[in-house]
């Protein structure tokens, strides 16, 4: 981290998810003393509040293959503007989700910020899922399974154009870490791009240190740095039960912390978002507490 000022931005949206509840994620993270913990690390923190989000009860969910698309696009456009302005002021955007579809707005704002400097950005996407579906390939129509595809220039026009150009990030500068649940058609999309995809088998065989170093290398090659999009379902449900789409066999407590510590050590992280914390599924806010701990590790907290 090269900046000492952080802008916290909440996005209480669950429109892109198949299960309700992740709209309470920003509150859960704040209740877990996020602000105080950031201040303890001697960051200057400005909490910009929450982005306005449409309530699903007030809006139709059509189209069926990209549910709540227009409402998600409107929210992501508002988020992109706030993220861009924060980055332009020299602040580090720290975005709290919400479901993972919010990442399109975060990346769009960052991409606009860096394009004004004629620079590129990278992305490290830590997730059990690839999130590279499109409306044509998605088995559910849930947009939280599509955001990375949108950032790479494939998906609904309402989302892929949010930065004003497409793709927002080059595939060779994207690394996905922790994959273990990929849809059949989505698997072909991942294989057909130059995205660097690291599955749980890669982590098992090579270790987190090697995998995350390769991810950092890919995301920082020729870029101004990289954005980290951390889906809490990347962590095993035994450690993080309160997530939108839990999948067994995920990152251990220490693997998740090591990944964030190494990312912090690199000095190349420009921004961070944590998504899919679902208090409805959680136990005593355990998942949000872990999420805050992981944010601290990425921002410089160490054991000694």
Image (cartoon, rainbow, N blue to C red):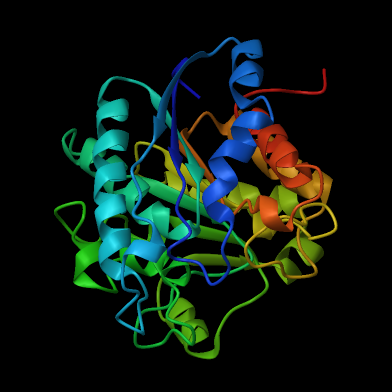
Which of the 4 image quadrants contains residue 223?
Answer: top left
Of the pair 75 and 255, the residue shown nearer to us: 75
Vertical position of residue 7 compared to residue 50: above or below: above
Residue at (80, 64) in percent of width and height? 204
Whether residue 120 is visible, yes or no, is: no
- Compared across the picture, whether 188 is left or right of 200 comes to left
Give the quadrant of the C terminus. top right
Q: Position of residue 199 (x, y in %)?
A: 66, 69
In the image as oriented, which residue stretches furthest toward the front? 58
Vertical position of residue 43 compared to residue 210: above or below: above
Residue at (67, 24) in percent of width and height? 33
Vertical position of residue 260 compared to residue 5: above or below: below
Vertical position of residue 161 compared to residue 31: above or below: below
Of the pair 32 and 116, the residue shown nearer to us: 32
Q: Position of residue 111 (x, y in %)?
A: 27, 45
| Count of number-bearing discs | 0
Residue at (21, 66) in percent of width and height? 158
In the image as oriented, which residue stretches furthest toward the right? 238
- Compared across the picture, whether 196 is left or right of 203 comes to left
Residue at (78, 43) in percent of width and height? 286
Q: Position of residue 6 (x, y in %)?
A: 45, 22
- Compared across the picture, whether 42 is left or right of 89 comes to right
Whether residue 248 is visible, yes or no, is: yes
Q: Position of residue 197 (x, y in %)?
A: 55, 67
- Compared across the picture, whether 222 is left or right of 206 comes to left
């Amino acid at each position: 981290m090269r900046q000492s000022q952080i802008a916290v931005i909440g996005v209480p949206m669950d429109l892109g998810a198949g299960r309700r509840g992740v709209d309470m994620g920003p509150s859960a993270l704040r209740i877990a003393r996020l602000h105080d913990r950031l201040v303890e690390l001697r960051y200057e923190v400005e909490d910009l509040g929450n982005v306005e989000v449409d309530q699903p009860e007030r809006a139709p969910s059509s189209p069926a293959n990209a549910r709540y698309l227009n409402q998600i696009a409107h929210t992501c456009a508002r988020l992109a503007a706030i993220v861009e302005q924060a980055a332009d002021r020299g602040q580090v955007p720290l975005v709290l989700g919400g479901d993972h579809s919010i990442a399109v707005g975060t990346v769009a704002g960052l991409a606009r910020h860096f394009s004004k400097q004629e620079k590129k950005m990278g992305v490290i996407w830590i997730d059990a899922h690839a999130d590279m579906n499109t409306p044509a390939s998605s088995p559910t129509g849930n947009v939280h399974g599509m955001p990375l595809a949108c950032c790479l220039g494939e998906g609904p026009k309402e989302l892929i154009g949010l930065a004003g150009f497409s793709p927002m990030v080059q595939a060779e500068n994207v690394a996905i870490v922790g994959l273990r649940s990929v849809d059949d058609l989505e698997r072909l999309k991942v294989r057909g791009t130059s995205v660097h995809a690291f599955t749980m088998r890669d982590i098992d065989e090579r270790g987190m240190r090697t995998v995350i170093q390769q991810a950092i290398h890919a995301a920082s090659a020729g870029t101004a740095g990289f954005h980290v999009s951390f889906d809490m379902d990347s962590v095993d449900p035994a450690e993080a039960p309160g997530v939108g789409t839990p999948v067994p066999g995920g990152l251990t407590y220490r693997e998740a912390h090591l990944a964030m510590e190494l990312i912090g050590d690199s000095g190349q992280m420009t921004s961070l978002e944590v998504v899919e914390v679902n208090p409805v599924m959680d136990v005593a806010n355990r998942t949000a507490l872990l999420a805050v701990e992981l944010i601290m590790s990425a921002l410089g907290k160490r054991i000694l």
